[in-house]
């Protein structure tokens, strides 16, 4: 330390460490913002174009962006994977999930759909003892029960809860939960392979469905937006994966719940939607129970 340096001046090493600690959460928040933009763009586009059409063009754009990474890693490595049947199951559930999501946002406000999707970790916690043999104590079972109550409240129990959009939303979030569960048993598979298979499954399903609901693309601007949808989704995946490598899960994973306030903002800004009181109460219960389950699992991992 030079004579001109104040005794209490922070060291550059400390500043670097602080910036490094902030980098992971910042990247995660950026990823959540891009996912929210992806959702808003998807809702906008499926109002004019078929769901299969949107998913097909989105998947083509995402694969174009992913191709250089696959080339540098070697295409042969894509198919050197563990548990082929589990890989196929994950692709199946991810494809069901993406179709259900776009169907849901076509008829429901963004905030409503996002509330249902944020319940997926609760379903994962409830199913893990039976499908993965994981032990769940009374504290997490209580949180799971509260989370399910939140889902019921968010559905606003009435005849409206049995609308196709609401039922498809529940189907989609359950498929998302099973996709997460299958992903837990595929930890040895590289991220690029998981993303490639997921996008390819959606592309194949889009090829099958698109001819039945294809709408002529009105302008080059719309075509650009359809491609941009895939680019934004791919960038969001990259940022989230990078954030999980830069920081531990306990730091960045809870930031996924920022999807809900972004959904409220974009829903109001672009579509004039405002969430009703029952939805906000249900969302609070879902987020609270989801966070408790997550931090409880982290605590038990440390003990283990």
Image (cartoon, helix red, strand yellow):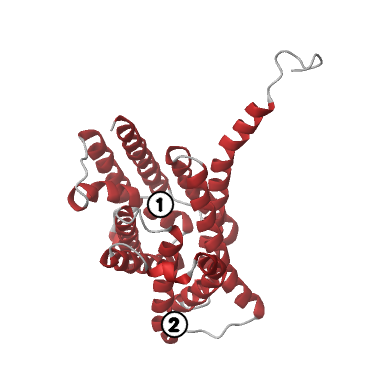
In this picture, residue 27 sits left or right of residue 151: right
Mark 2 or 1: the one toward you:
2
Task: Tell me which corner region of the image, top left, top right, bottom left or bottom right, holds residue 174.
Answer: bottom left
Query: Is residue 267 visible to us here?
Result: no
**Image position, residue 243 (x, y; %):** 52, 47
Give the number of the disc on residue 210: 2
Which residue, given by chain and number where applicable, does mark 1 sit on? 115
Quarter containing the C terminus: top left
Q: Image height check: is 219 above or below 1? A: below
- The x, y position of residue 64, in whole percent, is 56, 72
Q: Is residue 224 above or below residue 143?
A: below
- Mark 1 Cα within 10 Å, few/some/many (few <14, many 20+)? many
Residue positioned 58% across, 43% down in the render: 26
Q: Position of residue 189 (x, y in %)?
A: 37, 58
Spatial CA distance of label 2 from label 1 is 28 Å
Q: Which mark is residue 246?
A: none
Q: Earlier in the sequence, mark 2 or mark 1?
A: 1
The N terminus, quarter of image: top right
Residue 142 found in image quarter: top left
Circle 1 sits in a helix, a strand or a loop, which is it?
A: helix
Q: Nearer the viewer, residue 63 or 177?
A: 63
Q: Position of residue 16 (x, y in %)?
A: 64, 33
Q: Secondary structure at mark 2?
A: helix
Residue sitting nearer the eye, 112 or 290: 290
Q: Are marks 2 and 1 in contact (CB under 8 Å)?
A: no
Count neighbours of disc 2 (C-alpha within 10 A) and say few if under 14, some if 14 to 19, many if 20 or more: many
| Residue 133 visible from this viewpoint | yes
Q: Quadrant of residue 7?
A: top right
């Amino acid at each position: 330390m030079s004579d001109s340096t104040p005794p209490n001046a922070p060291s550059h090493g400390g500043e670097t460490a602080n910036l490094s600690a902030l980098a992971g959460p910042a990247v995660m928040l950026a990823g959540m913002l891009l996912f929210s933009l992806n959702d808003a763009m998807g809702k906008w586009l499926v109002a004019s174009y078929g769901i299969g059409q949107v998913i097909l063009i989105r998947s083509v754009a995402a694969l174009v962006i992913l191709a250089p990474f696959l080339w540098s890693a070697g295409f042969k490595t894509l198919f050197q994977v563990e548990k082929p049947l589990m890989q196929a199951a994950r692709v199946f559930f991810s494809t069901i999930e993406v179709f259900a999501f776009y169907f849901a946002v076509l008829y429901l406000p963004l905030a409503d759909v996002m509330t249902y999707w944020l319940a997926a970790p609760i379903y994962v916690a409830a199913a893990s003892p039976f499908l993965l043999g994981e032990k769940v104590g009374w504290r997490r079972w209580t949180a799971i029960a509260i989370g399910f109550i939140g889902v019921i409240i968010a559905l606003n129990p009435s005849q409206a809860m049995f609308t196709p959009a609401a039922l498809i939303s529940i189907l989609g979030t359950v498929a998302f939960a099973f996709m997460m569960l299958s992903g837990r048993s595929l930890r040895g598979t590289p991220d690029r392979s998981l993303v490639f298979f997921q996008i390819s499954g959606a592309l194949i399903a889009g090829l099958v469905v698109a001819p039945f609901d294809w709408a002529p693309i009105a302008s080059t601007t719309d075509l650009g937006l359809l491609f941009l949808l895939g680019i934004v989704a791919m960038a969001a995946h990259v940022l989230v994966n990078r954030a999980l490598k830069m920081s531990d899960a306990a730091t960045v994973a809870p930031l996924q719940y920022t999807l809900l306030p972004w959904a409220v903002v974009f829903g109001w800004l672009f579509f004039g939607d405002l969430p009703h009181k029952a939805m906000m109460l249900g969302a609070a219960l879902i987020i609270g129970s989801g966070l408790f389950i997550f931090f409880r699992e982290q605590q038990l991992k440390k003990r283990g």
